[in-house]
Image: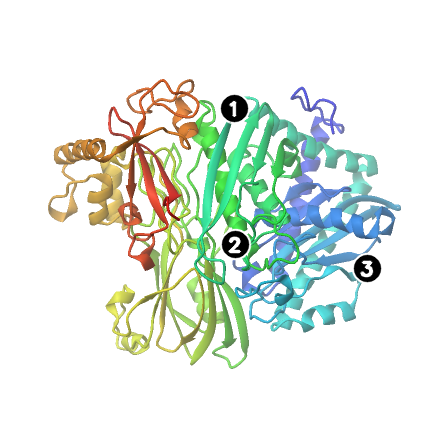
Amino acid sequence: MSKNVGEGEFKPRVGPIDFEVLRHRLWQINDEQGRTIINVSGSPVAAEANDFNVGITNAAGEIVCLGTYMAPLILAISAAVQNAFALFGEGGIEPDSVYLTNDPWLGAQHQNDVCLIAPLFWEGKLVSWVGSSIHQVDVGGNVEGSWNPLSTTVFQEAPLYDFLKVVRQGKIQPEVVATYTRNSRLPHMVELDLRSQIAGINVAKERLLALIREYGLQTMTEVLEDCLDHQEILLKRKLRQIPDGEWHTEDYLDHDGHGERLTTVRLKLTKKGDRLVFDYRGSDPQTPGFVNCTRTSLCGKTFLAIAAHLCNDIPWGGGILRAADILSQEGSVVDARFPAPVSGAPVNAGWSVQNTAGLALSQMLSASEKFKGNAMAVWVGSSFVYNVFGTNQYGKPFGTMMLSSTLGGGGARSLGDGYDNSGPISSPAPSVINVESAELKTPFLYLYRKRAADSGGAGKYRGGVAALSCLTPYDVESLRVFVSTLGTTHSSGLGLAGGYPGGGSNCLLKRKTPIVQMIKEGKFPQSIKDVPGEEIEALPSKYMFAFQAGDMLETVAHGGGGFGDPLERDRQRVQQDIRDGCVSPEYAQSLYGAVLGPADRILPEATEARREERRQERLQAGRRAAADRPAADLSALAGSIRCRHCQAALSGDTDASGEDCLVLRSPFRKAGPWIAVRLGGDNPRLALREYVCPSCGALLFVDVERNILT
């Protein structure tokens, strides 16, 4: 660590010019490692969805640079290196070797995230590590796709591999590869993924060795440490400019694989000086189902939240974690104790960690005049995936993981709307398979893929909308599908500063339809409701079913949370949302207070009058309560807690001098048509809680909380 870290200065050991040249060379080398994987791998998960990542570390395993793909995956490399040292000892690490692990307690986020790490030696000295982690479609176990929602122990899930030497003395070990692929239902796809990772490692090592030859070993080792110091110094410098405080957030898992049980992830974020403390020790105990995550996933998701919310102008790497402490209780849903089931870890409890950490950091940023523009509502409140297996249209064994969450909506900001169909915040370079490729490679026919109106959280700035997708089996009789998501009974896509949550996850199944015949006749329905068949079934967050010819599956991922009171949204923006199909005329009226005339044109004077009526309705309907949990969000004006709109003083946990807020409890349907669809828009266990200024009727904060008796 640089001696200047404490003073907030950065003086690279290698000099400023060499530092800039070499750090960009390192990033380019790592990017080439990632591109190699994409070019070699035949897996749609890696090549089409970018569900992998690559990294380069220092000798101790701290991530110096990571790829632009799925960011949380890369912390696996750090954990894997540290655990490799613990297993083999520093003297037991072999040159020209590649180690494989998929153990969630040793490095992977879950068993499908296969992590390969390789040490880089120069004249007998360990200099660095390079590696990657890819979600491989099937790594064994008693359920296709290797996610077992009915498991009660990790022994009922995919096999765990603890540092298999897949390469020894520079040569691939065929018996290791054969043993590993033997457990998979898709051995050829898995082996190609594995070889793509080895190819990426070989490319990165070759480029790094050339760099050492050009600049020397000392310069190479120093620039690795310089990069980490640079990341640490820049983040700590920023943190010192943000007011100290404490923020509390929660997120809910609505299904543990066994049933619809509510499990809570709780975070207390404390910021003091140049340090962040993420305290998850209030989270619920680990569940009997596969939704638990290990500490590896907990740290990876927290890292992602810090990087995405605080490091837009700071290189992403392990140095930023030097400014953070992550506290957890072993045996909790976010720090599961072996042998808990964890095969769904990163897209369940891990995703809730991502949500709570991101929202808490945005509340912290809202309290800073300088950085409040960086605050964001929640992006894509949950993952949405479905594993599909069977025989494809070519008569061959088939399996894949489809990602709907890559079509979810981004969170709104204080500066503008969230991005439509942005994909999750966890991936700086998200990707989604295009329809033509999907129909070529998979036995599906896409019926439509379009914007899901009203799925973005309402606000002064609207959350990004998600995509509405519908498909049916094609040229096959039946496929086996396992859907896994969170939020079919609520929304985890919370807004900020009075913005409503975005739509939740939804999976609608309609059986025995004549859809293929309709298309042959030139009829192209735009909704699952327009096709005759059995009654539409809204599926729970975890569900296995046979997907048969004539069935239709419609999916909508989480939309982004809104920012600010929807009644403050510019009328022209609302008008454009109606034209673009992002907001329906119905919800333009109910959420934004718009009054529409002919051709759905907004009537300005009538709209302003209606908005004022809505504010008065809030004042009449609300009950008084101290601002407690959202106090930090309300204190963005600094000093005492005040309304952003009229400056009225409000009481809360840090200042009792003002009036209590007014609080309204409402069913989810108030926030839009895509929340808790399978419950008719009203969840008996959870509800919206809206905080209203008692002076002007402005909406200050919208939360999702448990009902008192649940």
Crowd class of label 3 (few under 14; some 14 to 19; many from 20; radius 10 Å): few
Amino acid beneath label 3? Gly
Q: Position of residue 103 (x, y in %)?
A: 68, 57
Comparing 233 with 564, the one in front is 564
3 or 2: mark nearer the eye: 2
Q: Amino acid at mark 2?
A: Val
Residue that mark 1 sits on: 242
* Label 3 with label 2: CB-CB less than 8 Å: no
Q: State the image coordinates of residue 225 (x, y, percent, origin top left).
A: 74, 34
Asked if the residue under mark 1 is in contact with the one under mark 3, i.e. CB atoms within 8 Å, the reply is: no
Work out how far the residue at label 2 is from the one at label 1, CA to CA, in angstroms: 31 Å
* Earlier-in-chain disc, 3 versus 1: 3
Disc 1 crowd, CA 10 A, few/some/many (<14, 14-19, 20+): many
Q: Which residue is mark 2?
A: 347
Residue 442 lies left or right of residue 503; in this view the side is right
- Spatial CA span between label 3 and label 1: 49 Å
Which residue is labeled 3 in the image?
Answer: 170
The 10 Å Cα crowd at callout 2, few under 14, some 14 to 19, many 20 or more, is many
Q: Residue furthest front?
A: 709
Looking at the rendered structure, the secondary structure element under dot 1 is: loop
Please, is residue 58 above or below residue 195 in the view? above
Q: Are marks 2 and 1 in contact (CB under 8 Å)?
A: no
> Is residue 277 toward the left or the right of residue 364 in the image?
right
Per the rendering, the mark at residue 392 is none
Provide residue 544's location: percent of width, then percent of height: 46, 69
Q: Where's residue 288, x and y in %?
A: 55, 59
Q: Disc 2 on helix, strand or loop?
A: helix
In the rendered structure, which amino acid carries the disc numbered 1?
Ile
